[in-house]
């Protein structure tokens, strides 16, 4: 039996887990690809050798202040749709930082996921990681970016790729933010990617930290890191956030226990401090949130609303983009109006409602014959194996044949 067939057979034995997964998988009935929308971004066609064959988009506010934020979209999204949903260009207008938004091509991944699980794309000097580094070099040359004020964030596959960049080019970044992502080198193959997402790869803090230290010749100082996770996420299991915290607390030489816990917009925020008392790691767990980026489209930080709800862009009453930018020191708090804490959003995200007894919308991805696998076998085994193949393709983990 081939490696792929062995993987499929093992996954078929986990039917219940996969039924939940298939309901919300990108490309399945509960998630449709986002149509193109209005964009404020400008494409930069030439920026280097581009070994990862990515596209480069940027946004420059009217009064730029030499800081740069790299924003990586999730699967089924584009640079423009994620910018609109997460509200980054609105924040850039208010606080003056520039944006770099790499975009995946369908030729590289059928669901436009960054290839965070492919060995050739997650090493220093190679593939997609090298392409993103070349884009940063181009932005720095064109806009006189302060090399001490470069940051990166991403959602899901984009979050996992943000973790890749923080590990492979730590000297480039002052900070990063990983939303519904995974630790660096939690996967270097399709099978490991699935195990990491749904079963979670558990390592000791030192083992996770060693993977980062081995990724580059850099030996510190290290980027500060913000970690966000939905407690009801069925695509990337919440325990992955714990493994991320193990990785980055070890890299910073800190305990896994936070130094402080506080409430922000009704949600707990855990904080880790370095030897000088400065915040270097923070984490947020949004209890009822499914897979996606937390936004507060109805909230008004200093009279502004950041973000628009959509697939994997979830209104929960807290703007992750705003608080990430604030953690990095990009928000001028003197310009923000003082406001009382707000309670968490009372509504349950639609994806989670589906899983908790609401509309199931059908358990299998659309398209093709769901009743048999590629070997033509019928019955339950064939149906599950065929569904898994479709899910792998929809997730961008397996190419169509």
Image: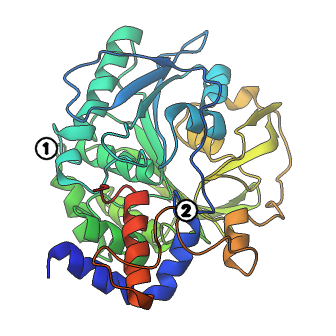
Residue 31 vs residue 368: left or right?
right
Which residue is painted at 66% across and 76% down in the image? 355
- Classify the position of the N terminus by image quarter: bottom left
Which residue is painted at 46% across and 79% down in the image? 371
Disc 2 from disc 1: Cα separation: 42 Å
Q: Which residue is mark 2?
A: 28
> How many marks are shown on the rendered structure?
2
Q: Which residue is mark 1?
A: 217
Towards the viewer: 332 or 43: 43
On the image, the x and y values in percent for residue 119 come to: 18, 53
Towards the viewer: 242 or 156: 156
Residue 83 vs residue 306: left or right?
left
Q: Is residue 283 above or below residue 19?
A: above
The answer to whether residue 29 is seen in the rendering is yes
Q: Of helix, strand and loop, which one carries label 1? A: loop
Which is in the foreground here, disc 2 or disc 1?
2
Q: Is residue 334 above or below residue 271?
A: above
The answer to whether residue 276 is seen in the rendering is no
On the image, the x and y values in percent for residue 79 come to: 50, 33
Which residue is painted at 37% across and 79% down in the image? 385
Q: Earlier in the sequence, mark 2 or mark 1?
A: 2
Neighbour tally class for label 1: few under 14, some 14-19, many 20 plus, Cα within 10 Å: few
Residue 236 vs residue 210: left or right?
right
On the image, the x and y values in percent for residue 237 come to: 48, 72
Instruction: Give residue 126's mark.
Output: none
Which residue is painted at 68% across and 74% down in the image? 360
């Amino acid at each position: 039996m081939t490696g792929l067939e062995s993987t499929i057979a093992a996954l078929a034995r986990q039917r219940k887990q996969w039924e939940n997964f298939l309901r919300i998988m990108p490309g399945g009935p509960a998630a449709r690809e986002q149509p193109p929308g209005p964009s404020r971004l400008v494409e930069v066609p030439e920026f280097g050798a581009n070994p990862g064959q990515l596209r480069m988009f940027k946004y420059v506010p009217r009064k730029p202040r030499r800081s740069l934020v790299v924003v990586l979209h999730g699967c089924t999204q584009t640079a423009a749709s994620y910018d609109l949903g997460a509200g980054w260009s609105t924040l850039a207008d208010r606080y003056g930082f520039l944006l770099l938004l790499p975009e995946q091509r369908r030729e590289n991944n059928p669901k436009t996921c960054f290839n965070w699980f492919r060995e050739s794309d997650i090493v220093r000097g190679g593939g997609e990681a090298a392409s993103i580094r070349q884009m940063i070099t181009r932005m720095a040359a064109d806009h006189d970016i302060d090399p001490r004020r470069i940051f990166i964030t991403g959602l899901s596959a984009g979050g996992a790729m943000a973790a890749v960049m923080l590990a492979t080019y730590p000297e480039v970044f002052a900070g990063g933010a990983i939303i519904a992502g995974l630790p660096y080198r939690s996967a270097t193959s399709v099978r490991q990617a699935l195990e990491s997402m749904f079963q979670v790869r558990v390592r000791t803090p030192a083992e996770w930290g060693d993977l980062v230290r081995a990724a580059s010749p850099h030996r510190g100082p290290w980027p500060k890191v913000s970690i966000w996770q939905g407690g009801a996420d069925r695509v990337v299991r919440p325990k992955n956030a714990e493994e991320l915290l193990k990785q980055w607390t070890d890299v910073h030489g800190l305990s896994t226990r936070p130094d402080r816990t506080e409430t922000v917009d009704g949600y707990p925020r855990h904080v880790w401090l370095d030897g000088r008392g400065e915040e270097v790691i923070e984490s947020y767990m949004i209890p009822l949130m499914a897979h996606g980026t937390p936004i507060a489209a109805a909230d008004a930080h200093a009279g502004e609303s950041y973000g628009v709800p959509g697939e994997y862009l979830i209104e929960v009453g807290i703007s992750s983009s705003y608080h990430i930018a604030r953690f990095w020191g990009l928000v001028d708090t003197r310009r923000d109006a003082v406001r009382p804490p707000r309670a968490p959003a009372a509504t349950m995200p639609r994806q989670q409602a589906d899983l908790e007894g609401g509309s199931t919308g059908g358990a299998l991805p659309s398209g093709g014959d769901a009743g048999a696998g590629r070997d033509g076998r019928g019955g339950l085994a064939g149906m599950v194996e065929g569904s898994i193949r479709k899910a792998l393709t929809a997730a961008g983990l397996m190419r169509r044949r």
